[in-house]
Amino acid sequence: MKLSFKKILVVLYAILMAFTSCSGGGGSGDGAGNGGGNSTNGVTAVYVAGNYVDNSKEGESQYISCVWKITESGKTETVLTNDSYPESVCVYNNTIYVSGTTWNSSSESYIACCWIISGDGTVTRYDLSGGLDAPSVYVHDGMAYIAGNCGTTVKTTACYWTINSSGTVTRKDLAFVLDYSFGNANSIFVNDDAVYVAGNYSSGTKEVACCWKVSEGKATTGGITPSYLLSGQQANGILVKDGTIYVCGKLYDEETVTFTGVYWVITDESTTRYDHAAVTNSYVYSIAVDSDGTVYTAGRRNGFYPCYWTGTTITELGSAEGEVNSIYAGSGTVYAAGNYSGTYDSGLVDVACYWKGTTRTDLTDITDKNISNADAAALFVYK
């Protein structure tokens, strides 16, 4: 029997040496999950991309991927391709963009893709050329930018794709400064001056976090090396605000065998790293910056428990195991999406959810015995 798609992705990521596992947090554009938005009041909808298993169905149809839209009037669900894993969501002009992976039964592997959901609810899937994974999408001036990796399980390279208004997909490969085995682009952000991509690569036993700034007109293949090498092993999220680059990721200490969530603030003058050192084995998947410059990052602490940080000050989100994959901050209000493991009928159930502040709202029903393995991978707050 084929493993659930979440478990297969864990195996794939282990092969690719990409430690983010199935979180897909990918980063937060201007404080809004994985794309645009601004920091004002007046939220009209919260969009959450996620997945779950519906055991009342058979075969691949039981692996449900979807986008939940939450408004004052309630929650609606738009289903994506069966047996897929959405990892990032962005909304632009009433059109929803979701990036991730989908199962290709002919090749017995997952391939990178992007779903575009039009205002009338029509879902169109675009397979991304040569792609293995697509953890981040951002839309700028009607153009979708999707970060990910391409290649084979023997060697991958970081890349990003664009999809224009006509549906044309174009890939741009990114390069590294050293010989490498595995390279990943984990998050993408775009503004008028450049495309910004955060990722990492491995050279032998060495992992290096990095980010690229790709100006308009740069070479389309192979020649774009990182603009910044960062003092850490992985960069999971990126955004740019008022000319400052913000990146979140992880630091690994080989001597103590511990992980520390971190974020970097990059200006023209310097690069400063901030460590979440107050807890053991913290992981950071997503970053947001509020209008007053406050930095928020999100993930899990002590290896298993969902939380977010304001600067380096932790806010815990309950005592149940889980994680936060995506975060938004606006006018002092924080939204976060992820999952927790709850107890029902003497068993543990993974529940997809989001938090406003520390108040949790479940997106799947823990009492529904047909629903399991649920996760909210990404969040976008629409103004």
Image (cartoon, rainbow, N blue to C red):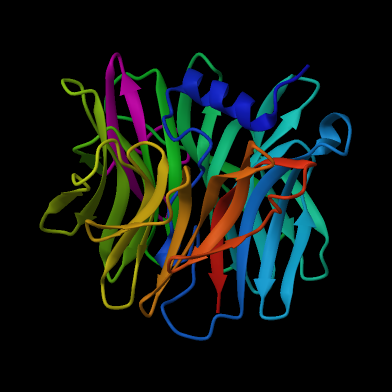
Position of the N terminus by quadrant: top right
Q: Does 221 lie within the magenta span?
A: yes
Asked whether 47 or 364 is in front, the reply is: 364
Residue 151 visible in the picture = no
Question: Which quarter of the figure is the C terminus placed in?
Answer: bottom right
Q: Quadrant of residue 106?
A: top right
Tell me what residue is drawn at x 18 percent, y 38 percent: 231
User: Residue 66: image x %, image y %?
Assistant: 72, 52
- Residue, x 68% and y 67% (percent of image)? 69
In the displayed structure, would residue 268 be above or below residue 109? below
Dividing the picture into quadrants, the one containing residue 370 is: top right
**Up/down of 258 relative to 284, above or below:** above
Measured as percent of width and height from the top left, residue 37 is found at 49, 72
Question: Horizontal placement of 352 versus 222: left or right?
Answer: right
Q: Of all residues shown, which one is farthest toward the left?
A: 269
Q: Residue 140, how many percent across, how many down? A: 52, 65
Part of the protein shown in magenta: 200-227
- Counting from the top left corner in percent of width and height, residue 196 is at 38, 52
In the picture as drawn, the residue positioned furthest to the bottom comes out as 42
The residue under the point 43% across, 29% down is 18
Asked whether 86 falls inside the magenta stretch, the response is no
Front one among 363 and 51: 363
- Quadrant housing residue 49: bottom right
Foreground residue, 255 or 165? 255
Residue 72 shows in this picture: yes
